[in-house]
């Protein structure tokens, strides 16, 4: 096929294969990447920018086709629908390292479409998709400062493992995805089982080192496909410099004053006033150019205050954590709740317990997964003082929720240990930096407040970086403005023992081991401080509240499972309706009963045990007359067990037996004998 190029790239024990020129040839660029039997196609399309656009419209869409795993979609329509959570998270994973590799002046629209075409049972597709996107972008003739590559790092038996399989990840204490260019780490996404800071740094550096040969190979691949490239320059560079100087002269004093104002709202009002003064009298056609440079002046002032004077926007030292306020179980009808406030960032976090039937079933391509722990993060517009319409979760909310969940997941007991489904919801009510880490702190406290047996608190903090040449400063517990105007957003969560979650996004090159180590150790100090504040309020799980479902667990003989279920499920359904409980029954005979309170759950348990019990000779039972016949009365003394109370047992004088006993009468009987054929002989029990 004309212009078809294929390149095989060794990556540890596996091989990454890149192909172009065969599929999606009308796109600006397309690459098919494969590792083993996992195949991802990535098509990039670009469109020239509209005049006056002041942002870079990059969009990334990752799609998983069910046919890739030999499956047919569920539901009525039997076709793929809106993006799943996995697709959304993978789209973000691809977007984050791509975005900083474009120059600030580039405004053309770029769309990246990654599609999973084939999935084996060994190689996760997200890392393959990342490298497919990098390779496609490298041959799209755009000002892409790549290529970049990605690697997954596991930690199994005290050793780092490159690109572990699905099966290996089950036994790994680490699941980390690292993306980077030849000279810098760009993005890290990780969850871990309380690993030390040294091990986390080692994993990042190991992943980056292992991907360097791949980066070079993608570079060679792109040069073979596209030997001649367009040279892109900033067309407004000279004008920008002149406007910047003018804006700085007119606004520097006002902005300096604004950035010494601690309160976010008041600071915003001052900045807006300076902005309006700048625009007053300017031709409207110049507004966009001046506003662009206004942001650059803001950035310069904040960064120089930090680098030159170690002075932050809100007056804190570089390592200082904002003031923390905590309340637990402040919502009277909720199973567990926490109000966590750190500076101007605040989260209401709740924990709700449900039965095993409330677990989330995820029909993932790699196989169905039942998840007993859910965490949902909501970021309403009022939390930042803006207008907005309540809608479903956006990509950012899904991503922040996933980070908080990963940070807490390792501490949540399994269904076998704690047979409740657990849903944590974080409602961000104020935001000025690091709301996802506030969700981790609040989530940990809410779990304890609800009585979930987690061994200790988990806290999170967001770190920032300002770097100019050889000068740099790492910032603890960054504000929203410090995130926006800085060079790194580095979120770290964990316990006193180690790291459980980590997310890093870097906007510049040159982040070395020294900076990573300083950031992680500074984050550890902050985490210990926050954990200390949390432990002052709640350091161990409370008793389960009476608001949570009462749970009892017991076992019946496995031969009795069918008895409890009944014909067509009639018996178990009847029990659930009669007692208002949820009954979970395993083939092994294990029974879980959930009820609103102890009384109904224990009553249902007693009835199930009675259903499964065997009659005992000599034992006295409370029975109900089921039927009266000429030679006696049949008495139901256990569920499904009728015995004969012979007419000779009735000592009274009567003409007809119904003169002394009738259906529905309650009588006390003793099981006198169990016959060879299972016939049950009853006698009156003596009072």
Image (cartoon, rainbow, N blue to C red):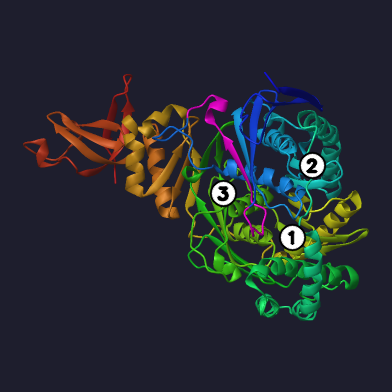
Please tell me which of labels 1 and 2 falls first in the chain.
Answer: 2
Name the element at disc 3.
strand
Q: Residue 684 in magenta?
A: no
Q: CA distance from mark 1 to mark 2?
A: 30 Å
**Vertical arrangement, residue 570 with respect to residue 428, above or below:** above
Residue identifier under label 1? 461
In front: label 1 or label 3: 1
In the rendered view, would you say 98 is above or below 279? above
User: Within 10 angstroms of label 2, few (less than 14), some, or many (20 or more) residues?
Assistant: many
Quadrant holding the N terminus? top right
For discs 1 and 2, the disc positioned in front in the rendered view? 2
Identify which residue, 656 or 559, lies in the foreground: 559
Is 88 left, or right, of 464 in this rendering? left
Find residue 406 and report its horizontal and vertical position in percent: 66, 48
Q: Residues within 10 Å of mark 1 (few under 14, many from 20)?
A: many
Residue at disc 1, secondary structure: strand
On screen, residue 595 versus residue 503, left or right, reads: left
In the picture of the structure, the residue carrying the numbered disc 3 is: 374
User: What residue appears at the point 84 percent right and 73 percent down from the top-left corner?
Assistant: 311
Which residue is at the front of the view, 473 or 484?
Answer: 484
Q: Which residues are magenta?
A: 50-72
Pick whichever of labels 3 and 2 is earlier in the sequence. 2
Q: Which residue is mark 2?
A: 146
Q: CA distance from mark 1 to mark 3?
A: 21 Å
Where does the image place residue 527, in percent across and percent down from the top left? 77, 60
């Amino acid at each position: 096929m004309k212009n078809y190029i294929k390149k095989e790239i060794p990556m540890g024990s596996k091989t990454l294969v890149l192909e172009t020129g065969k599929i999606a040839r009308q796109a600006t660029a397309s690459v098919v990447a494969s590792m083993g039997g996992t195949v991802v196609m990535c098509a990039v399309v670009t469109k020239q920018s509209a005049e006056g656009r002041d942002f870079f419209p990059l969009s990334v869409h990752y799609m998983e086709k069910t046919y890739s795993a030999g499956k047919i979609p569920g539901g009525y329509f039997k076709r793929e629908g809106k993006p799943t959570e996995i697709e959304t998270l993978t789209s973000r994973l691809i977007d984050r390292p791509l975005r900083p590799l474009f120059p600030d002046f580039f405004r053309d629209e770029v769309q990246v479409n990654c599609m999973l075409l084939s999935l084996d049972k060994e190689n996760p597709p997200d890392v393959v998709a990342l490298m497919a996107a990098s390779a496609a972008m490298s041959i799209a003739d755009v000002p892409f400062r790549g290529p970049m590559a990605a690697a997954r790092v596991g930690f199994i038996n005290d050793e780092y493992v490159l690109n572990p399989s699905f099966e290996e990840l089950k036994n790994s204490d680490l699941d980390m995805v690292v993306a980077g260019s030849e000279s810098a780490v760009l993005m890290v996404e990780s969850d871990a089982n309380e690993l030390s800071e040294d091990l986390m740094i080692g994993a990042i550096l190991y992943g980056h080192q292992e991907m360097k040969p791949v980066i070079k190979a993608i570079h060679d691949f792109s040069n073979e496909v596209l030997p001649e490239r367009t040279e892109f320059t900033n067309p407004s560079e000279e004008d920008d410099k002149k406007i910047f100087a003018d804006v700085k002269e007119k606004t520097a004093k006002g902005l300096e004053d604004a950035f010494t104002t601690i309160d976010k709202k008041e600071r915003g009002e001052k900045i807006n006033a300076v902005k309006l003064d700048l625009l007053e009298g300017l031709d409207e056609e110049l507004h966009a150019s001046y506003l662009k440079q206004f942001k650059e002046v803001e950035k310069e002032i904040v960064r120089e205050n930090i680098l030159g004077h170690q002075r932050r926007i809100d007056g804190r030292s570089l390592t200082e954590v904002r003031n923390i306020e905590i309340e637990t179980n402040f919502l009277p009808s909720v199973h567990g709740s926490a109000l966590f406030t750190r500076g101007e960032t605040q989260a209401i976090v709740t924990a709700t317990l449900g039965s095993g039937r409330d677990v989330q079933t995820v029909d993932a391509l790699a196989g169905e997964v039942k998840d007993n722990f859910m965490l949902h993060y909501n970021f309403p517009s009022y939390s930042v003082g803006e207008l907005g319409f309540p809608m479903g979760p956006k990509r950012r909310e899904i991503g922040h929720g996933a980070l908080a969940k990963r940070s807490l997941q390792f501490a949540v007991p399994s269904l076998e240990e704690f047979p409740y489904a657990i849903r944590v919801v974080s409602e961000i009510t104020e935001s000025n930096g690091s709301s996802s880490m506030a969700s981790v702190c609040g989530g940990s406290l809410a779990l304890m407040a609800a009585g979930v047996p987690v061994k200790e608190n988990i806290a999170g903090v967001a770190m920032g970086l300002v770097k100019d040449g050889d000068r740099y400063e790492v910032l603890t517990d960054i504000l929203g403005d410090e995130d926006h105007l800085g060079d790194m957003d580095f979120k770290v969560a964990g316990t006193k023992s180690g790291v459980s979650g980590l997310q890093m996004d870097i906007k510049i090159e040159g982040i070395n081991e020294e900076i990573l180590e300083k950031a992680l150790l500074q984050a550890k100090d902050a985490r210990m401080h926050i954990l200390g504040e949390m432990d002052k309020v709640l350091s161990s799980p409370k008793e389960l509240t009476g608001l949570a479902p009462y749970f009892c667990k017991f076992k019946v003989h496995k031969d009795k499972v069918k008895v409890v279920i009944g014909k067509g499920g009639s018996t178990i359904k009847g029990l659930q309706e009669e007692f208002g409980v949820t009954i979970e029954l395993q083939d092994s005979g294990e029974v879980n009963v959930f009820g609103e309170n102890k009384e109904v759950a224990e009553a249902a348990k007693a009835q199930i045990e009675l259903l499964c019990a065997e009659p005992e000779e000599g034992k006295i039972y409370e029975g109900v007359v089921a039927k009266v016949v000429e030679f006696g009365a049949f008495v139901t003394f256990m569920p499904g067990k009728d015995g004969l109370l012979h007419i000779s047992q009735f000592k009274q004088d009567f003409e007809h037996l119904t003169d002394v006993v009738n259906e529905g009468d309650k009588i006390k009987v003793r099981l006198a004998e169990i016959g060879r054929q299972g016939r049950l002989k009853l006698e009156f029990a003596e009072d």
